[in-house]
Image (cartoon, rainbow, N blue to C red):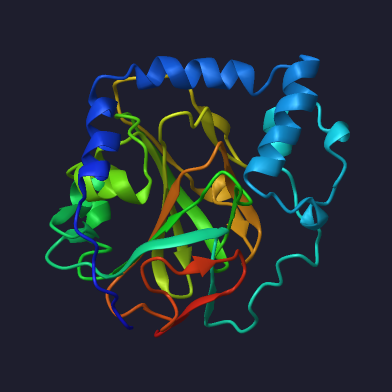
Amino acid sequence: MKQHPEQSPSLSDYLKAWPQYLLPTHALSRVMHALTRSTNPLMRRWFMRWFARHYRVDMSLAQEPDLDSYANFNAFFTRALRPDARPIVSGEKAVACPVDGTVSQAGPIHDGRIFQAKGQDYSLLQLLGGGPHRAENFTDGRFATLYLSPRDYNRIDMPLTGKLTAMSHVPGRLFSVNAATARIIPGLFARNERIITYFDTEAGPMAMVLVGAIFVASIETVWAGEITPPEGKRVRHWDYEGSDAREFAKGEEMGRFNMGSTVIVLFGRDAVQWADSVTPGAPVQMGQHLGACRV
């Protein structure tokens, strides 16, 4: 996989990142949660139209292109796409991209560390909430960090067919997850609040880490509904066995961000090889070829 030169932090990056240490990010996100579900006409009409114009949202791809049909901003933000808008890559060993967005980073996990940006990395163990028995499945494996912008489709679909085995909610900070903040905040993705989902797939264990951020009003999965908020301080964990071990097909929705953020996909050692096109800064679409199983 080709690597692009990493951009060094700039003064602008520091000015964007440092004030976030002082912001009441959880309180601001709770306010956003209420605003995005408001049925006030100002939010439903004026703000949605402004947002669609400002971020150049292509409503022709939406299953429902009429903005007036959405009950609130969150319904618009998490809109479904037309069935033909995002074809899913075929082939049992082909790994599909789970989201629309941009590749932040992708590559090998070295000595239990994941690369974040030039001069920055973080611990796999910390990312997964401190569970060594889960982290060992991905030691020396591969990761892909995918950033979703506000204009993107904000549902998260399965890269491979897989059986749900477990889920964790790890409380944390709510820093922004854009490129500038990733260059400045140490261990960003292992510090922010996150939902970690685990699956058994043809390529072996797979984890999808749904990372929260400032103004991400909530994260939900299709089997458990809205998981954040409420805010908490303890790690929560769910194991799924028997009838609870639900199977998802490749390309099937597994969760969504109610406002955009980041997904980190993890596979074990020698499980997958990312496509040559998966390089930092590359745009991606849900369903496109992200890589291939090697097992």
Q: Based on the displayed image, in which of its 4 quarters is residue 21 positioned?
A: top left
157 left or right, relative to 232: right
The image shows a total of numbered marks equal to 0
> Which is more toward the observer, 117 or 83?
117
Which residue is painted at 59% across and 73% down in the image? 288
Residue 278 image position (x, y, % from top left):
42, 75
Residue 190 image position (x, y, % from top left):
25, 43
Query: Vertical placement of 34 versus 135: above or below?
Result: above
Q: Looking at the rendering, in which quadrant would you find the C terminus?
A: bottom left
Residue 170 image position (x, y, % from top left):
33, 34
Is residue 75 in sight in this rendering?
Answer: no
> Which is more toward the observer, 259 or 56?
56
Which residue is painted at 81% across and 32% down in the image? 70
45 left or right, relative to 288: right
Is residue 237 in sight in this rendering?
Answer: yes
> Which is more toward the observer, 102 or 10?
10
Which residue is painted at 80% across and 62% down in the image? 83
Residue 259 image position (x, y, % from top left):
55, 36
Q: Based on the displayed image, in which of its 4 quarters is residue 236 positioned?
A: top left
Which residue is painted at 30% across and 29% down in the image? 173
Query: Vertical placement of 168 versus 37: above or below?
Result: below
Residue at the limit of the structure toward the front, as seen here:
11
Q: Looking at the rendering, in which quadrant would you find the N terminus?
A: bottom left
